Image (cartoon, helix red, strand yellow):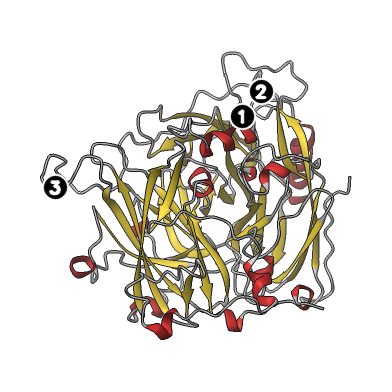
Amino acid sequence: MLPIVKARGSSNNDPVEYELNITQEQINPDCSEYNGNAVLVNQQLPGPAITVKQGDYVRITVRNFLPALSHPASNVSGAGLNDVTIHFHGIRQYGSVNADGVPYLTQHPIPPGAEYVHEFRVVNQAGTYFYHAHVGLQEQTVFGPFIIHEANGPSEKYDDERIISLSEWWHVSRASLEEYFLGPQFELIPEAQSVLINGRTIHNTDNPASSSSSCEGYSVINVERGRTYRLRVIGASTFRTLGFGIAHHNLTIIEVDGEPTKPYSVPFLEVAPGQRFSVLLHTTQPLNDYTIGTNRRWAEDVSRGSNGMAILRYHKRESRRHASKRQVQNQEKGAIVTRLPHNQPRFPVAETPQWIWSDLEPLHGVDPVVYRPASRTVKIRATDQKMPDGSTRWFINDVSFVEPSTPILMDLAKQTRRPPSIFTTGAAKSSNGYDPYLGTYPLEYFEIVDFVLQSTHIPGEPCRSHPWHTHGHSHWEIAYGTGEYDEARDGSIRNVPNPLQKDVTLVYPRPDPTEDIHGNSTLATDQVGCGWSKIRILADNPGIWAMHCHNAPHMLMGMMLILEEAPHLISIPSSMRPQ
């Protein structure tokens, strides 16, 4: 098995190279009685960190070493045959849409025994990102950090940094979960048996299966007293939004999804699937161990408590040489820890829609595009529906996402795809921007488009939160509201004072308080609006881009759409064109 390889050239024009090898391993990350088969990157959970500098040219080879299956193990396209793709989450891929890693949009999925080479330059981005699988529910265990260091050094000063990845682990096979979500038995998304911090936790603290050779106990984050650390917190969870905190420590937010922010101190983070934060941690407490904890946020009728725990371990301040040596030793040969300190982080019982988002400010000021008029507004209304076969699907404006039969990018390369005509026909407004022939939402180059992300529910039933992710773009959340968005009433609302540029926006549950399910105008079975967010995209990046809920089961069940942006300007590599 080939290990990860990193090679750096003498200039930004020489590629930084990595190899990601996808394998199937049996793991027990939560020291439980359940040993499950999992798809891993380089036999690690999380996968190895990719670290580059702003402006670097990157070449990443993904090799699929999964066993070939003659018959699908599930009814998930690609996943049942052990096909794979890797998406670099938050990387905008300017001029390199073929490296975005979305099956049947930008490439064929990689079958067992094959490989795919991603080549791209990191353009005008720095911060905390990650990579993950984009087939079925493989992302549960196929993910790893992607860190871009600033070309001229960070704007905030700190002594060192640590990466913390949050994920979930179910005591059931991935294929079984996929079949459940897409089958007639589906009712609700089950909570994961464990929340993992850097791929580890203890499922049952009263009876850890520490005798198992695969049990690694809690993750231990080693720090020195009297220093300042940058913690890069990655929301690699599959389903649940998680609270994250450290006992007796505040966290100072300095980055969200790659956007530097003015420092803002919080007692805990609220991390939706796909979101990333950088926070400064000042190690000013007495020498001790401190519990790093999580809890479930925006969860109806389930325990908010979580077994996602780790340990922050203080050491005496040492010289740089000795500290570096001790850090390596602690990471590689540290004793297995199966007991937590008595101190615990505290999370508020009550949840507040929008959390502290309206208080955050971009470090370098709000982008002027926020203040310009939009070219148009497109409402994205999400509903879930029971199908005739008893299964459940998510729909966007009455369309449930189905993968194209061939990659759209390849159709463009072969010139077998007709260009969008929606703008010349004047039908954009009446169709809400959707081209039913292409199955996409066409965008003109450099237009400003506001997307209203509309959540719905049946009155009296819970309203779900949805973390919406945009590929190829960061966006600005410029407004939010309760109930159902109405353009005439709500179109002028701008209640986010200093919009951040980010690539994930959590649409919080905000039912209309005046909603009356007994009224004559609304049937109790009709889905009504229960909260919306308006995000703004500047269409400055020609490509075929996914836009979807980053709750992976929701995406699997159809909560995804395609932005077809200035297709005549897309840069298509010669390898994709007919020879």
Disc 3 target residue: 514
Name which of mark 3 and mark 1 comes first in the sequence.
Answer: 1
Residue 506 position in % (x across, y down): 41, 53
Name which of mark 2 and mark 1 comes first in the sequence.
Answer: 2
Verify CB contact (< 8 Å) between mark 2 and mark 1. Answer: yes
Image mark count: 3
Verify CB contact (< 8 Å) between mark 3 and mark 2. Answer: no
Q: Secondary structure at mark 3?
A: loop
The answer to whether any part of residue 287 appears in the image is no
167, 395: nearer the viewer: 395
Q: Secondary structure at mark 1?
A: loop
Q: Residues within 10 Å of mark 3 (few under 14, many from 20)?
A: few
Give the residue furthest to the top.
207
367, 140: nearer the viewer: 140
330, 103: nearer the viewer: 103
Quadrant into which the N terminus falls: top right
Residue at horizontal 51 percent and vertical 49 percent from the top: 555
Q: What distance separates the C-alpha of mark 3 from that of mark 2?
A: 48 Å
Q: Residues within 10 Å of mark 1 (few under 14, many from 20)?
A: many
Residue at horizontal 55 percent and vertical 67 percent from the top: 545
Amino acid type, residue under disc 2 in the picture: Cys
Q: Secondary structure at mark 2?
A: loop
Give the residue furthest to the bottom.
424
Q: What distance separates the C-alpha of mark 3 from that of mark 1?
A: 43 Å
Amino acid type, residue under disc 3 in the picture: Thr
Disc 2 target residue: 31
Disc 1 target residue: 201
